[in-house]
Image: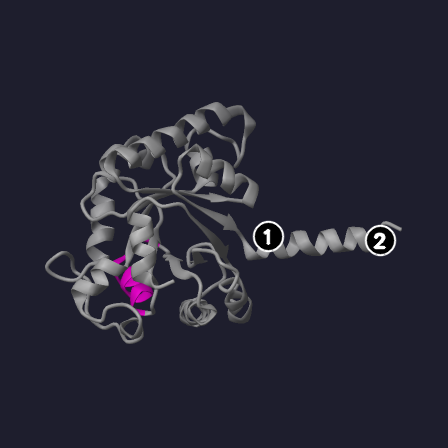
Amino acid sequence: MTAAEFARKIRNRERCVGYWVVLDAPVATERLARLGYDYVALDGQHGFIGTDGLLANLMAIDAGGRSAGLVRVESGDPAMIGRALDFGAAGVIVPLVDTADDAARAVSAARYPAAGRRSYGPMRSMLRIGPTPAEADESVLVLAMIETPDGLANIERICATPGLDGVYVGPSDLCLAVGGRFPNDPEVADVFEAALERIRTAAADAGIAAGIHNPSGEQAARRLAEGFTFATVASDLLHLEQAAAAHLKTATSG
C-alpha cells in the first residue's frame, strides 16, 4: 500500500489495522509487513530503535510491500518529525500532545511551506512519497497521541486543529491520566471507558480518524466495533515472549 493510499483510508475514516514494532530487527519487520496489516508502526519513543534502525526498518516495511510505515517519534520536536518523514515514513504519531497548539506545531513540522515549516530534504522519501511538496503533504499523516490529563481535557480543541489527520490513544498513559494506579487498573475502568467514548466522539465530530493501541487482535476488534477507525496490535517483543512461553508449556506438559 502506498503512503497516498493509506492516507486516503485514514482520512476517510475507513477501518485499518496495524502492528507495533519495538525491536530493531529489519528482517522480522519485513516479514510482518508481508502479512497484510494496513500499517506497521515503529516505536521511536519507548522502543529499541535508533536513528539507523528507523531507516532500516522503514526500508524493510517497504520491501514487505503490503503495509504503510508509521513512526512514533520521541516528541513533537520538528527535527524528529522531519527526519522520520525524510526517511520515508507515511506518517508520524506524536506523543504527549496536551493542547491544540501542540497539535498545530506537529502539523506544521510535517507540512512544507506555505502550509507548514518542514525543511525540504527528502533524501529517501522522495523515491516513494511526493516528490513535490504538495504531493508529500497530501501523502503523509499527522496523528496526535491522547494520553495525558491535559490532552483529554482539550480533546475537542485538539481534534479541531486544521491539518490534523487523527488522534491516537495511548491506553496505558491514559489510564494513569484518569487516576489509575497502573495500566488497566480495574478501579478506574468506568472512567477510562468514558474517556475513550469522549475521544471517539470528538474525533467523529471533527471528521478525523481515531485510533488506539491494543495488546491483542481480540481487543482491537472490540475497539473497532465501538467506533475507533484504526487499531494497532502490539507488539513484536510481547508476542515473541508469548509464543515462546506457549511452546515451552506445550513441550514440557507431558
Q: Name the residue under label 2.
A: 252
User: What residue lies at 79% left-to-right and 51% top-to-bottom?
Assistant: 249
Residue 226, image x, y percentages: 44, 32
Magenta-drawn segment: 75-86
Residue at image coords 51%, 70%? 26
Q: In this view, does 166 lie to the left or right of 180?
A: left
| Image mark for residue 238 | 1
Is residue 76 in sight in this rendering?
Answer: no
Q: What secondary structure is marked by label 1? A: helix
Q: Which residue lies furthest to the right in this view?
A: 254
From what the image shows, is residue 136 above or below residue 11? below
Q: Nearer the viewer, residue 80 or 210?
A: 210
Contact between marks 1 and 2 (CB within 8 A): the answer is no
Neighbor class of circle 1 (other Cα within 10 Å; few <14, some 14-19, many 20+) is few
| Residue type highlighted by circle 1 | Leu
Find residue 85 and report its image quarter.
bottom left
Reply above or below: 195 against 30.
above
